[in-house]
Image: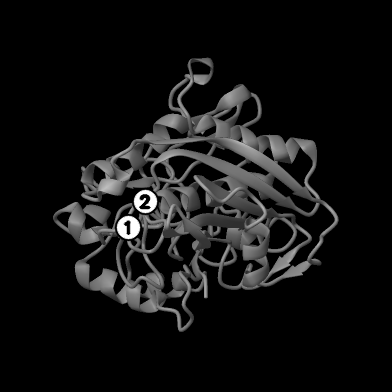
Amino acid sequence: MPRIRRIKLLPIPLTYLYISPFPSSIHKQNLQAISACLISKMSTFVLKVFVLVCVFHLSLASRRLNELVKDQTQLLHYHNGPLLSGKISINLIWYGHFNPSQKAIVSDFITSLSPSPVHSTQPSVASWWKTTEKYYHLSKNKKTSRPLSVSLGKQILDENYSLGKSLTSKQLLLLASKGDRRNAINVVLTSDDVAVEGFCMSRCGTHGSSSMGRVKGRNSKFAYVWVGNSEAQCPGQCAWPFHQPIYGPQGPPLIAPNDDVGVDGMVINLASLLAGTVTNPFGNGFFQGPAEAPLEAASACPGVYGKGAYPGYAGNLLVDSSTGASYNAYGANGRKYLLPALYDPFTSSCSTLV
């Protein structure tokens, strides 16, 4: 059976475990309590939406992440497995209807992950992504000695809903398998009219791995990601802070930087899942807690986008003077994005761009 890592990237402020409000964290015993809340009976990595209840009751929102542990090894342990390394193509598999503007928002984000003199305005998407490099310095696995370089790969369109408009986890894997699997991350993106198993109830996206057979005499795996467009189904769960949350503090939503609540929300979740994919691709990389429901590079910093974040408040962000949109990173082709904080293993804290 393929291993599927389900990570709930819900943008509900401060009360759930992904985009939650406690900007920086907790006591060790509380982390264990959170981990217990996250354990799933299924062999999947799930960051449940309803974890927000557990987090709220543990009064974690007011505590700082650096209080959780004294050093990074206590928060995100390295489990001696390989990290993705070398040249990796990120292939996009579009399932359902996406207009050209929506596709450009996502593809420009992927392009922005790589440093370029053409789009060097700071703070940048590339500088955000650079935090993941620190995990490679801490890895002792020889297989991850090569530096990671990601680039936009192929884009596959399935506009005719070949598997219908209600997908299971197994069907997501079938779609992910359509892309080149060697030296790649295959990203399945489902449109706002597609229902997916667990979507809006227990997850906003997933990342996982599956076998791709023998390569050079060895059994090999490929990594994949799925993210859904929540705008028509559950923006209060999966597109915060661009929509009011269904639970927790009800502050006014932020204006999306690309004027698309659903796709800007997808970018947040995709960014988080990609960070988790490269640093914990096969379930034995960097994570904290049970392997079935781990805290990873981004999910360790729920609800934090800028300095000063607290429950219901994403943090101090940049604001576009003409549109009023909030963002914290510049990207390719004049794009602006809002990206989640990443856990910095060198400083044992959540790292934000602004």
Name the quadrant of the C terminus: top left
| Quarter of the image where one finds residue 190 | bottom right
Residue 26 picture quarter:
bottom left
What amino acid is found at the position of numbered circle 2 in the picture?
Thr
Find residue 131 and report its image quarter: top left
Q: Counting other residues with Cα less than 10 Å from the Cα at mark 2, is it few (<14), some (14-19), or many (20 or more)?
A: many
Extreme-front residue of the structure = 217
The image shows residue 54 at horizontal and vertical percentages of 40, 75
Mark identifier at residue 279: 2
Give SS at disc 1: loop
Of the pair 221 and 47, the residue shown nearer to us: 221
Q: Position of residue 199 (x, y in %)?
A: 63, 68
Q: Secondary structure at mark 2?
A: helix
Residue 80 vs residue 12, the one in the foreground: 80
Q: Residue furthest top?
A: 117
Q: Identify which amino acid the numbered label 1 is placed on.
A: Gly
**In the rendered image of this protein, does residue 165 appear above or below residue 271?**
below
Left or right of 108 in this view: 194? right
Q: Residue at x 65, y 24 (%)?
A: 322
Q: Position of residue 107 (x, y in %)?
A: 64, 36
Q: Residue furthest bottom?
A: 41
Residue located 52% across and 48% down the image: 182
Instruction: Name the outermost residue toward the left.
Output: 70
Residue beneath disc 1: 285
Residue 90 drawn above or below residue 68:
above
Q: Say left or right for 280 vs 257.
A: left
Q: Earlier in the sequence, mark 1 or mark 2?
A: 2
Looking at the image, do the residues carrying marks 1 and 2 touch, with CB atoms under 8 Å apart?
Answer: yes
The answer to whether one can see residue 258 in this image is no
- Name the residue located 56 percent from the left edge and 51 percent from the top edge: 181
Where is residue 37 drawn, in percent x and y? 39, 77
